[in-house]
Amino acid sequence: MAVVVDRADLFFAEVSSRFRPVRDALVVIGLFYVSKKLVGLGSDLLRAVRVFGLARLFRQDFRKKYGQWAGNAI
């Protein structure tokens, strides 16, 4: 099917209307990708808070718990 237009805005409107399903599919794929990255970032942030933040709040004496070898620096 040939499309003949004499103005660029009409041409753009015709082309964009024909590729609307492709655009919608790419939007869904993009939203899925961004949400996956945000969940991963949130998971990494929670892990960092748990490892570095909570370990400083609730310190343990490993020498008392496991013996003299637990407190030696490597």
Image (cartoon, helix red, strand yellow):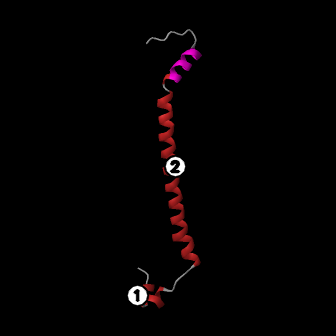
Q: Which mark is residue 46?
A: none
Q: Amino acid at mark 2?
A: Ser
Q: Which residue is mark 2?
A: 35
Q: Quadrant of residue 11?
A: top right
Tell which of 7 and 26 is nearer to you. 26
Residue at (57, 15) in percent of width and height: 10
Q: Which residue is mark 1?
A: 69
Q: Main secondary structure of the magenta part?
A: helix
Q: Quadrant of the C terminus?
A: bottom left
Give the answer, above or below, for where 4 lies relative to 60: above
The secondary structure type at the circle numbered 1 is helix
Image x and y of residue 18, in percent: 49, 22
**x and y, in percent, of residue 41 in the image:** 52, 56
Q: Position of residue 26 (x, y in %)?
A: 48, 36
| SS class, disc 2 | helix
Residue type marked 1? Trp
Q: Which residues are magenta?
A: 8-17
In this rendering, which labeled residue sits more in front, label 1 or label 2? Answer: 2
As measured in the structure, the alpha-carbon distance from the residue carrying label 1 to the one carrying label 2 is 45 Å
> Do tag 1 and tag 2 residues touch (Cβ < 8 Å)?
no
Q: Is residue 31 above or below residue 44?
A: above
Residue at image coords 51%, 34%: 24
Q: Is residue 58 above or below residue 4?
A: below
Q: Earlier in the sequence, mark 1 or mark 2?
A: 2
Please say whether residue 32 is one of the residues in the magenta stretch: no
